[in-house]
Image (cartoon, coloured by chain):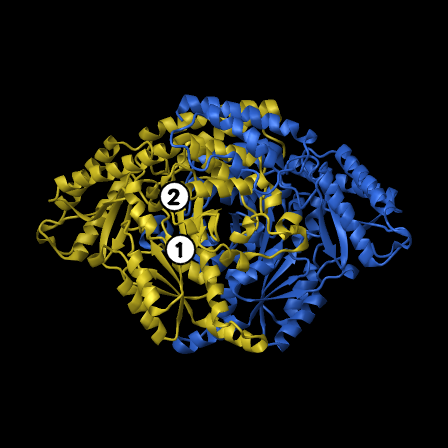
Chain colours: A blue, B yellow
Amino acid sequence: MDEDQFRKAAHSAIEEIISYRRSLPSRRVLSTVQPGYLAPQLPPSIPTEPEPWDAIQPDIDKLIVPGLTHWASPNFMAFFPAHSTYASMLGELYSAAFSAPAFNWLCSPAITELETVVLDWVAKAMALPESFWSKGEGGGVVQGSASEAVVTVMVAARERMINRLTEGLEGKEKEAKVAEVRGRLVALGSEHSHSATHKGAIIAGTHFRIIPASKETGFAMTGEAVERVIKECEKDGLIPYYLTATLGTTSTCAVDDFEGIKETLRRCGKDAWVHVDAAYAGAALVCEEYQHLSKQLEGMDSFDFNMHKWLLTNFDASCLYVRHRTSLTSVLSITPPFLRNQFSDHGLVTDYRDWQIPLGRRFRAIKIWFVLRAYGLSGLQSHIRRTVKLGQYFHSLVQSRADLFGVVSGPQFALTVVTIKPLPPTARAVQNELTRKVYETVNKRGEVYLTNTVVGGVYAIRVVGANPTTQEEHLRRCWEVLVEVGDEVRGEMPPGGGAR
Amino acid sequence: MDEDQFRKAAHSAIEEIISYRRSLPSRRVLSTVQPGYLAPQLPPSIPTEPEPWDAIQPDIDKLIVPGLTHWASPNFMAFFPAHSTYASMLGELYSAAFSAPAFNWLCSPAITELETVVLDWVAKAMALPESFWSKGEGGGVVQGSASEAVVTVMVAARERMINRLTEGLEGKEKEAKVAEVRGRLVALGSEHSHSATHKGAIIAGTHFRIIPASKETGFAMTGEAVERVIKECEKDGLIPYYLTATLGTTSTCAVDDFEGIKETLRRCGKDAWVHVDAAYAGAALVCEEYQHLSKQLEGMDSFDFNMHKWLLTNFDASCLYVRHRTSLTSVLSITPPFLRNQFSDHGLVTDYRDWQIPLGRRFRAIKIWFVLRAYGLSGLQSHIRRTVKLGQYFHSLVQSRADLFGVVSGPQFALTVVTIKPLPPTARAVQNELTRKVYETVNKRGEVYLTNTVVGGVYAIRVVGANPTTQEEHLRRCWEVLVEVGDEVRGEMPPGGGAR
């Protein structure tokens, strides 16, 4: 593809993208393709001869678009949003054009330095503790996802604890102690922490224990609950080395009791690494009204949130901040001759490869830079406030039919979690079954896409409409669909609400 | 940024990208910026108000481009190439527009299914053993990098070995045995394996031992060397669970003795996981003349190569193939309620999140699809053959001045590794010092960018000119620079070649 062909192809791609995005409100948000739909429509192997763009492009609309779940649709209210904006797309385009596996500073100084700058910008805008800014001993790094960030800090936490408990030992004695400690390490997370913590514990090769967080505390993990589990662990000979605290849990957007947790760890004399996973809700910290939470991050070992969820940047752009960057670099730095250079050797520069699991890394800072500038802080704030308000609006709709739906939690960071109310009231198992039926029927209709959860034994439906294009009308329509299906499902309920 | 603003901005970005790439041959390949150049040129925080594209775009050329290392330059001959092509950039653009953290099938069926199709296409084109195709028990997955792939399979290998050695045990007994085995596991790699294996062992929390691979075997790891180290490990009570074998080592593009290694493992009765890291050179397998190596992959547990190095796709696109996909999914699958759906529950579909460390994943298959179609198999092959020939051409130039430079290895997969020849011949330390001086002087001049290595105690310079725009003239100019600097450095050598 030469320059002229590229220009022509790119112009055509841009028109297609504009028209795709314009079409989103009228598209069914969930795809209707069946498993295995694609392969039979494609040739069995790479074409022998080059194909012109004119032959390739039509297949996108014909074969790919029908198989997409439209995350950018205003009717996508499932999981958490995964934004993509025009500013951010331009960033990806430049990133691809400037392609470099920018593992160290010298491999493209601009890639490293812009990353440091934009992460400091974001830290400042969010009023994160200064210990997370690059000017001191901490700093930020862009990771691919919040789950990758969790694994990264868990490995650092594991090694920090092993080092502390084997300090001063040497040779065989040290080796034996390391093996013993390793076998006793346990990572902790609340029952509402993202599954990434459990998976991270598997990858790090340690135990994992769950800390209960019940309805009574709004599904937030408390210091007392942490203390109880720590004591159980100790009784069982386990050493807690890591804890995920969450700012905005996946199920209900609960915020754990950070101050209580810190107090517990201080009192217990435990120096487990505390990571704050704010994957989705962290974005709200750009607004002053949420910055009391930023203050509570003081003393935490690490904090991570995704610009690629609620902050107008396309996947991937997960911003991880650590209090001591050496806690990452001392574990993750390996320097063979071909990675050595005068700048790195003299400690003059940041080599982000030592802050992450993979060696290579993409130029992700440029799209973050574009987004921050194209929206401005005021634009970011009004986006968050507007979507938080949409959540409140949806909640008010639910309350208007308190006979049909009950609120399990929210509105919290634009998320409301609901169940159907059986008539007459009945056993929870039956209620769960009805809610499940409502959930499945709504998604089958495909006009909106929602996800489910189970909290405190209650099967519930999550509604979070926080895309830039989502308006009141979309939440109202979502609500109408829920009411229609809710009435229908409840109408089918056998008299007495017994087994179905 | 609305549609019209995006259209205008994107058109302008495309012109800038075209003109950037056109300018590459005349640009100094290495940036001259000093550490910390960028931050003082940028405001200290996010602008309060939105900025128009007209205000943002000029800063790219003014602030970012001067800080880039131009990996796409025809004069970039360092590390391994990291391609980026117009076809691939278009893929990134669509990927950003269709943004989805496509962790499971339902989250965008097209993203999953296209990935399976293109990886099968590539497997077929490379004549990989059918055990790596998706139709049987194996299959491919796109990872971010070869180093991420290494960690992923190491974790799977670790758990496989632990499971095998604790089979049938239960409760406390099992727990104790798991801890004991965990402390004794050792990963193996040759001294020329990529540092990712060492780093992977740290992340996986296991021991790591190096297998020597000397000049006598062309820096390739042999079955005998593996056997010796395995025996030493056993003497020390360690259990080898994983081995990286390399197809194209970083230093010299050596190919380990796959058949010898497999034979050793069979004979020793060891069931360590063997991963073949073909990050760079694997791309050559699209040509029949290299496919005798594909045959030797039969029986290997996994194989990985990067389309984003030598195969015309921008970073990231690392293709990992495994023989038994359950060896990944049984370890890496965690399914909380919000990730459950009828398709995954019934095992009808592939959920690639269970094949990798992070949960979310980008739509990387679309750029691979574009590249495979835009070049066609014949285009991929002629690209590889053309650049292999460039390596041979460079080697012939080196031979023409056998008095000045010696060949340490190559030409192998377009890579030639050279040292300067001191006159008169002198101690190796002095020779190393002279080569180092040549290397540093060449990079300081910045007309070409090369990297160094140390093999068998010899300090050497790697030259690999394999970008799509690299031509004979660029390798000839690189050679002229080397000769100029080599003559100069050797001329400064004190009589007798003694200490300098």
Amino acid under disc 1:
Ala
| SS type, badge 1 | helix
Residue at 11% over, 53% down: B497
Q: Is residue B393 above or below residue A270?
A: above
**What quarter of the picture does the N terminus of chain B occupy?**
top right
Horizontal and vertical percent position of residue B285 = 34, 43
Residue A74 showing in the rendered view:
yes
The chain containing the residue under callout 2 comes to A
Instruction: Name the residue beneath numbered marker 1.
Output: B196
Q: Alpha carbon of mark 1 to alpha carbon of mark 2: how far?
A: 18 Å
Circle 1 chain: B
Instruction: Residue at 50% x, 70% y: name it.
Output: A182
Q: Residue at x 11, y 50 (%)?
A: B494
Answer few, some or many: residues within 10 Å of disc 2's Cα (few below 14, many 20 plus, some between 14 and 19): many
Which quadrant holds residue A188?
Answer: bottom right
Q: Quadrant of residue B498?
A: bottom left
Q: Where does label 2 land, which residue?
A: A107
Q: Is residue B77 left or right of residue A32?
A: left
Residue mark closest to the camera, 1 vs 2: 1
Residue nearest the viewer, comparing A368 with A192 = A192
Quarter occupied by residue A400: top right
SS at badge 2: helix
**Badges 1 and 2, same chain:** no
Q: Is A404 placed left or right of A38 in the picture?
A: right
x then y, percent, for residue B266: 34, 65
Residue B145's spot in the image, x, y percent?
44, 48
